[in-house]
Image: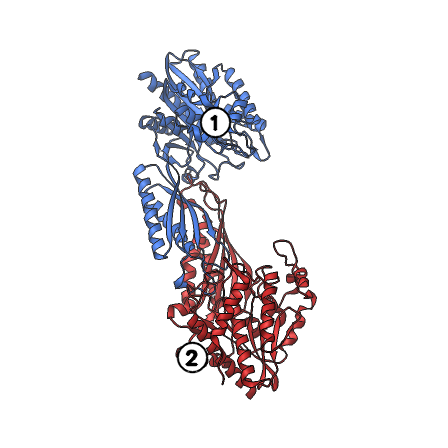
Chain colours: A red, B blue
Amino acid sequence: MGAVDSSRTIAELKELRALTGDDNGAQRVAFTPIWAKAREWLRTKLSQIPAETHLDAAGNLWATLRGKSERALLIGGHIDSVPNGGWLDGCLNTLAGVEILRRVRAECGGDPPVTVRVVDWADEEGARFGKSLFGSSACSGNLEMDEARALRDKAGVSLPDALKDHGIEFERVKESHRELANAAAYIELHIEQGPVLLDLDLPLGVVLGTFGVERHAITFRGQAAHSGSTPMNRRRDAFLAAAKMSPEIYRIAERSGGGVCTIGSCTTKPGIVTSVVEECRITLDQRHLDAAALARMFDEAKTASEQFAKEGNVGVEWERLWDIAPMPFDETLLRFCEEAIVESCGVAHRLPSGPLHDAAEVARAGVPTVMMFVQSLHGISHNKIEDTKEEHLELAVRAFDRLATKAIEWIARQ
Amino acid sequence: MGAVDSSRTIAELKELRALTGDDNGAQRVAFTPIWAKAREWLRTKLSQIPAETHLDAAGNLWATLRGKSERALLIGGHIDSVPNGGWLDGCLNTLAGVEILRRVRAECGGDPPVTVRVVDWADEEGARFGKSLFGSSACSGNLEMDEARALRDKAGVSLPDALKDHGIEFERVKESHRELANAAAYIELHIEQGPVLLDLDLPLGVVLGTFGVERHAITFRGQAAHSGSTPMNRRRDAFLAAAKMSPEIYRIAERSGGGVCTIGSCTTKPGIVTSVVEECRITLDQRHLDAAALARMFDEAKTASEQFAKEGNVGVEWERLWDIAPMPFDETLLRFCEEAIVESCGVAHRLPSGPLHDAAEVARAGVPTVMMFVQSLHGISHNKIEDTKEEHLELAVRAFDRLATKAIEWIARQ
């Protein structure tokens, strides 16, 4: 087996940053001129390998090294970023894929045992239209067409019109599904975007899957009353009931074995200093890798809210905002990923992914999938301070290449 | 002693409601045409007694029955209301005073033992300019001139300009202080605006004084973090710390012996469903009749906030929004008030006033003061559903007249 040149990936990440970033960070928002410029730069890199490239019906960019078998290993990433984004989120994945294509090409010439493809998904972040995983959900077939058709950016431009400017016909985006016809495995490298590996002082992690999400708004309704003339025992205080939920969700998450719960916003009505709160609305985001555990977390929160409402003589109402099932990754690929990490740096840690990724869409389409995480400094992403040690980035590219090799061998054996 | 005609007060309250209210309630906002119309109606009633009337420098309307002594009993009220207000708040006080003037005039002719005056304070509610107790604080000398000079209503009209339209020169409003020169006692009847007497099933209460108030904004500052990728034990959740304050203030109020604490508003930043709350701002309003107990409630809340901040690894900052000292009423007048109530209906209950009243300003100016409360149905005011049983209103006018008699005799003895 040949070796990838992991230092070249770092150099290319810096080259991309210089080309498409500014003092505030990365500016490669999908379906904008800077994103198109990044894509052009990427196509040049790919043609130099050389690999065949084409855009699919959803604007995803595919680079293909045809092999002895049509059965294909897919390596995914996304060169788009949020506004003022970091230098790694998404493009590390893509450029690590490019480096693996180079290595396979160098090692096998035009004749690898299986087909190897890199896909640069269109609009993973959803920064302009507020809908993430556009390209991968079009490809998986899960994109809600009516919802997507109605999306507009802040300037009022519709998603279909923005797509047209980039040569994409909205009504045909799901035709990209045909790209998965021979897909035998999908792998994706990503920065962790959290502090778990940092806390464990480990460079790399095996991603077990993406969390399922239950997202709700909870509204407590009591009675506005004068802050001076209403005795404490006569109050129907909507804020009191909502506030009790906060320590409670920490207990629920702790009992769940690995889940997380977040109250991200709280609004109060009438919301004035001289009145007991009549109406308090909080949002609750709950995530777990295990569907049964997620359902249990949701039930426990609901029961707690009803108890607190009863204690405070207020009403409570739940409204579902969004939900998605957990997407556990493929057992065989999880094992390959763990082996690749152990061979590269001695220790692997298994962890779930809180954020969603394109990988979840590919897994949903039935393609065996796995992701590898590399440690994030500060545990922060979507920000110009997003960073990872260069030695960890190099290690990640090398371990990811080992994973690719194992996957190729696995596909070839099938 | 003659008797007041308490049924006439009810009839006059209804007459005023028909003249100055609509389907949404009372509309006598101070310094508006409807308020001026109510004042004109009131002056006609006063001139029929007959009593001398005049406007003071702050726009307070005074009606005087000169007596053998210049030393005067003052009876206060306010005919102004909030927009969509109730039929009793403020004008019950004024019209009960008018009825007492009639009774004194009928009983003593032009020659009562002491001078008896009714004052209809200008703009108790502060509904148009957001500053309550305007007339009484000008009279007491406590009005902050620089603050008041800068006040504007929603249409941008300044308070000085609005006053000019009603013949009042802003820079001279504190000259109204001379009205208190011979004031020997001040009494005021008011609806309770809370549920205490209702819960006790008592019609009338002796008001011990007005609560002191400590009003603060408390801001907790943690760290925004992704709701999916941040483990619970790594969060610096500003909402968690703020939420813990809510049950805590109930415990603080309970320990305080009669105080009340209210968190009236809560705002969160970034305030989105997918992020741990970085910044959470709550308002805390604390009230107690005892200055030391109020100070203790404030200290306990501060200590608790610091403990919750420490537990959650977040910062906390307090900002004082407003404060006012408690204003306990006069011991002798409290006793007279209790006697008057017991003589009228058998049982008196002593309670503090949560809301401020013009009486607090008069007390602050050094005039012996007391208030009497009559039960509120629903415990609600500043709303068209504000109400009190007619039998309780009649009882209140009669008991209040007894209090006036006792006060007059007391002043005459001095």
Label 1: chain letter:
B
**Dot 1 and dot 2 within a common chain:** no
Image vertical order of residue A114 relative to residue B279, above or below: below
Q: Is residue A170 visible?
A: yes
* Residue at image location 55% in from the left, 20% down from the top: B40
Residue linked to disc 2: A344
Image quarter (top left, top right, bottom left or bottom right) of the C terminus of chain B: top left
Percent of width and height locating residue A201: 37, 70
Residue at screen point 45% across, 62% down:
A380
Residue at the spot of label 1: B78
Q: What element carries label 1?
A: loop
- Please name whichever residue, B193 or A373, is drawn nearer the observer in this view of the structure: A373
Amino acid at pointer 2: Ser
Residue A16 higher or lower than B214, as above or below: below
Tell me which residue sits at (64%, 79%) in the image.
A181
The amino acid pointed to by label 1 is His
Alpha-carbon distance for marks 1 and 2?
83 Å
Q: Is residue A32 among what the camera can see?
A: no
